[in-house]
Amino acid sequence: MHPKTHDQIIDEIFTLFRQRGDMEYGESVTERMHALQCGVLAQDEGQSAELVAASFLHDIGHLVHNMGEDIADQGVDAKHEDLGDAWLRGYFPPEVTEPVRMHVDAKRYLCTVDPEYRAGLSPASEQSFILQGGEMSPEELAAFSASPHFDNAITLRRYDDTGKDPNLAEVDLERFRPVLLEVLERHAATT
Ligand code: FE
């Protein structure tokens, strides 16, 4: 079997978003709108290609599982951050996959250290926070903040919390092809 080209990997990602991205993310935006908005927020702040890619791809775990859209309502945590990490790991470097894997724990971290942040959670986000384990223990806080990807995980989390404006026009998925290519090419050159 021939390895996939970078463009084929990106096509596969875009196909997932085209075919499954109409699922409700919640709060009146689709999964695709949420992903695009998070990617744009990272781009607008001049983040690295890797963090832009992570922001765009952080919820891809929602698109690669088959457990249904209302899984949180059933009281089940699909662990979408681990599904996303596992899926992306075949193609992308830790600079992308680690902030993705950590984005749920980033919410737990912020909820634990910042009461104002927790008070600002939507009801849906509060519900998932409890399912995801609630507040971190001191040991969990220390381990989480010791990661070399801590800052990027927290930054991604801020985009995750902001990138859900139902009134923003949807940008084209192709906007992210150049940045994804840049990441894949850099990664290929170092492995
Ligand atoms: Fe998200």
Image (tube, rainbow, N blue to C red):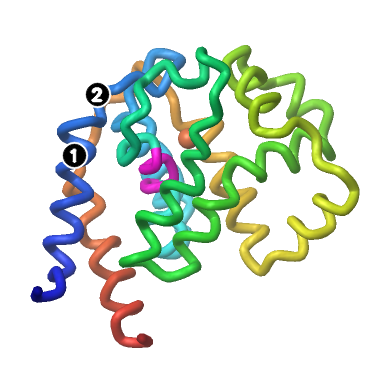
User: What range of the chain is rendered magenta?
Assistant: 56-61
For this view, does 30 lie left or right of residue 41?
left
Work out how far the residue at label 2 is from the one at label 1, CA to CA, in angstroms: 14 Å
At 15% from the left edge and 43% from the top edge, which residue is drawn? 15
- The disc labelled 1 sits on which kind of residue? Asp
Q: Which mark is residue 22?
A: 2
Q: Position of residue 54 (x, y in %)?
A: 43, 54
User: Which of disc 1 and disc 2 is earlier in sequence?
Assistant: 2
Q: Which amino acid, by three-letter code, is at mark 2? A: Asp
As helix, strand or loop, the secondary structure at mark 2 comes to loop
The stretch drawn in magenta includes residue 60:
yes
Q: Magenta includes 62?
A: no
Q: Quadrant of the N terminus?
A: bottom left
Residue 57, position as x, y percentages in the image: 37, 48
Give the SS element for disc 1.
loop
Extreme right residue here?
A: 138
